Structures are given as structure tokens and as C-alpha cells.
Amino acid sequence: MPFFIPFAVGGLVLTALGLGVRKVLAEEAAATPEDAHLREARERHRKALAELRADRLRVRDRVASYGALQARVHAEVLVPFRALMERLERWGHVREAEVLDGEALDALRAVLGEAPSREAKRAWPLLGAGVTAPAALEPVLAWLDRGWLDEDAPPVMLDGVPLYEAASARAVLAASAPDEGGRALDDAAGVLSRTTGFLGAMRTRLTTLEQRVSGLHGRAAVQLAYLDAASFEEGGGEPRERLARLAVLVGRLAVLLRVPVLSPEGRLAPELPAWPEDEPAEAAPRRT
């Protein structure tokens, strides 16, 4: 069997070498304390990134909800109110400046200015109605909407934090010394967790604004339904009283719609104090 013995021997030799190589590799793969810490740091970073992504989706949903409410208020209250006031002024009954204070009048004119593009209106829930997004915030708005972080794109700066540098484990490790990778990943995970907390504060602010606008929207829509320009021809006081109450609600709505959640630097903007008009009015008695 001269032909088979060399192959058998060779096979045994290769098998032995193979087992030896696997053994050596297994020994090299045994976790050192540094390796274990790096793996644990990677896992902590991964969890922090997952939480950030989940909260971004929650903010995106809240932005969409508040944006839809802004559009309804614009179409159902502000535009009809402007049409009513234009008729009343044309007929010589009353002027806007007589029923709206300066802040409310400026806000109403800003919201009812030239029709913005659909893309511009997407920024309104976070920056205020009628506001054009500054260039520095466009990457932030795009990330909140789509969730993309690109190394070569303009940086996403949220609350003073460049997100790509903290979210990319590869970038974190590349920027740190070999024996400092675990600590660098933990530092980045801490940054991601703080950013997640910032997103939570944004979501709370959006929810509060939506609740305030929703309450005023319902009350203003009811008042508007009882008013028409022809009722002022009778000369009674009730239409003017209703108009005065409606103007307060419309003015508050216009001001609220322009309240930003984010500053141009990507930080939380100051919160607008509550008004008495935020409280729901008692139901009026029915006429018999």
C-alpha cells in the first residue's frame, strides 16, 4: 500500500497541526481583564445607543403630532379669524389693532404670512410657526426625522454634543489609545445617555405645548362658530363681546404656535409661562 500510507500520515500530521492551531488560537482568545472590560464597555455603549434611538423615535412621533395640530389651528381658527377681521374692517366695524395687543398681532401676522413650503413647516413644531430653520440646525432636524448619522455630513450638534463622535464605537476607539478604549466607550455611553435625557425633556416640552394649544384651539373654534360679520350690523353688544373673547384666544394661539422648543444652537429654549386662558372655561349654561 505504497500510495496510501503517505496520505494517511500526512492527514494525521495535518490533523494534529490543525488541533494545535485551534488550541493556540483558543488560548490567545482567553479573556484578559482588559479584553473583558472592553467587551463590557462595548455592550454598555450599544445599550446607550439603542436607548437614544428609541427616544429619537418618540420625539419624532411627538413632533408629527404637534405639527398636525399646528396645521389644524392654522386652517380652522387663524385663517377664518383673519377673514372675519378683514370683512369687519372693510365694513368699518372694528380693526385688528383694537382687539389684539401688539405681541398677539405680530405673532398672528407672522404665522399668517406668505405660505411656507412643506419642508419649512416641518421645522415649526420645534422652532415655532413661521420660523425658518437656521443652517446649523438643519442636520439636527434631519437626524430627528430620519435617524442618520454620517461621518462626512455636517455635524449633528444637540445640546452642545456632536452625536456622531459619541454614537460611533469605531470612531471612539480610533480616537483613543489602545489601552483606553473601554474608558472612552464608557465616556461616550455617558454622553449618549445625557442626550437621551435631553430628548426626553424635548418630548415633555412638546407635549406641554400641544396640550396648551389643543385646549385653546377647542375654545376658539367654539367662539368662532358663533360669530359672523353680519351679526355686527344689528349694533348689539354681544357680537363685540364674543369677538373680544375670541381675539384673546386667537392671540394666545398665535403666540403659542411661535414658541420654540429648540434654540438656534440646538439647546432647550426658554419655556413660556402659563396663562389664565390655559385653564378650561366652565361650560356656559344652555339657553332655554
Image (cartoon, rainbow, N blue to C red):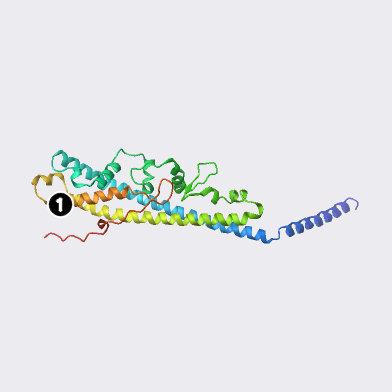
Is residue 102 found left or right of 24 in the rendered image?
A: left
Kind of residue sitting beneath label 1: Glu
Q: Judge whether 161 appears above or below 116 on screen.
A: below
Q: Residue at x 55, y 48 (%)?
A: 165
Residue situated in front as seen by the camera: 160 or 151: 160
Compared across the picture, whether 154 is left or right of 215 comes to right
Q: Mark 1 points at which residue?
A: 241
Which percent across, then down, holds residue 283? 20, 60
Which x, y percent locates residue 129? 33, 45
Residue 153 percent location from the top left of the image: 52, 41
Residue 226 in view: no
The residue sitting at 58% across, 55% down in the picture is 185
Name the residue: 87% across, 52% down: 4
Is 21 positioned to the left or the right of 210 in the image?
right
Residue 27 appears in which quarter of the rendering? Answer: bottom right
Are there few (<14), some (14-19), or many (20+) residues within 10 Å of tag 1? few
The C terminus: image quadrant:
bottom left
Residue plotted at (8% across, 46% down):
234
Q: Which of 49 and 278 is in front in this view?
A: 278
Closer to the camera in the image, 101 or 67: 101
Question: Is residue 135 in view from this perspective?
Answer: yes
* Residue lying farthest to the right in this orientation: 2
Q: In this view, does 120 lie to the left or right of 96?
A: right
Which of the 4 image quarters holds residue 98? Answer: top left
Task: Say what secondary structure mark 1 lies in.
Answer: helix
Residue 161, x across and y down, in percent = 50, 50
